Image: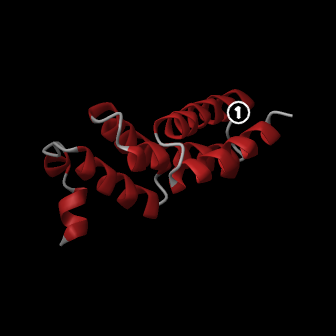
Amino acid sequence: MAKDFLDDKNEKEKFETPTQHVILGKYYLIKNELDKAIDEYAKAVQMDPNYLEARYNLAETCFAKATEQPQLTHREKKRLLIMAGSHYHKIVVASPESQLALKAIIRLRDIQEKFK
């Protein structure tokens, strides 16, 4: 039932809240459709820039795509890592004491290693 709902393009167009886009992003992530997951998380962040879970999920998905898909060009990997880094940085600035910030700092270090 849920799969049918999410697979129906007309239903997806009715999503109006950032949380709905995050849920759809998680669905695509489970299906390993990273581009679609990135799009949904980006919509959530665009709707609510302070929604740190959405921002973190977006950063994590960009990081995963850049590091787990060897067929990507160096330029595309770099673009994804820069995008991920930007979102991780915004999480740290917005909520420096949070668990997400701690995870983001670790990922920022991982990204720095990729650029060495």
Q: Which of 8 and 60 is in front in this view?
A: 60
Residue farthest to the bottom, as pictured: 1
Q: In which quarter of the image is residue 45?
A: top left
- Residue 35 is left or right of residue 107, and the answer is left
Image spot of residue 109 (x, y percent): 74, 43
Circle 1 — which element?
loop
Residue 43 in sight: yes
* Snapshot colouring: secondary structure
Q: Which of 12 and 52 is in front in this view?
A: 52
Above or below, 78 against 16 in this view is above
- For the residue marked with disc 1, what is the amino acid? Thr
For image coordinates 72% across by 40% down, the residue present is: 111
Query: Which quarter of the image is occupied by the C terminus?
Result: top right
For image coordinates 31% across by 40% down, the residue present is: 44
- Residue 42 is left or right of residue 113, and the answer is left
- Residue 14 is left or right of residue 53, and the answer is left
For image coordinates 37% across by 52% down, the residue present is: 25
Image spot of residue 115 (x, y percent): 80, 33
Image spot of residue 28 (x, y percent): 39, 56
Residue farthest to the front, as pictured: 97
Q: How many marks?
A: 1
Above or below, 94 against 21 in this view is above
Q: How many C-alpha atoms fall within 10 Å of the one at disc 1: few (<14), some, or many (≥20)?
A: few
Image spot of residue 20 (x, y percent): 23, 51
For image coordinates 56% across by 42% down, the residue present is: 62
Residue 31 in sight: no
For mark 1, what is the residue?
A: 73
Q: Quadrant of residue 8?
A: bottom left
Query: Which quarter of the image is occupied by the N terminus?
Result: bottom left
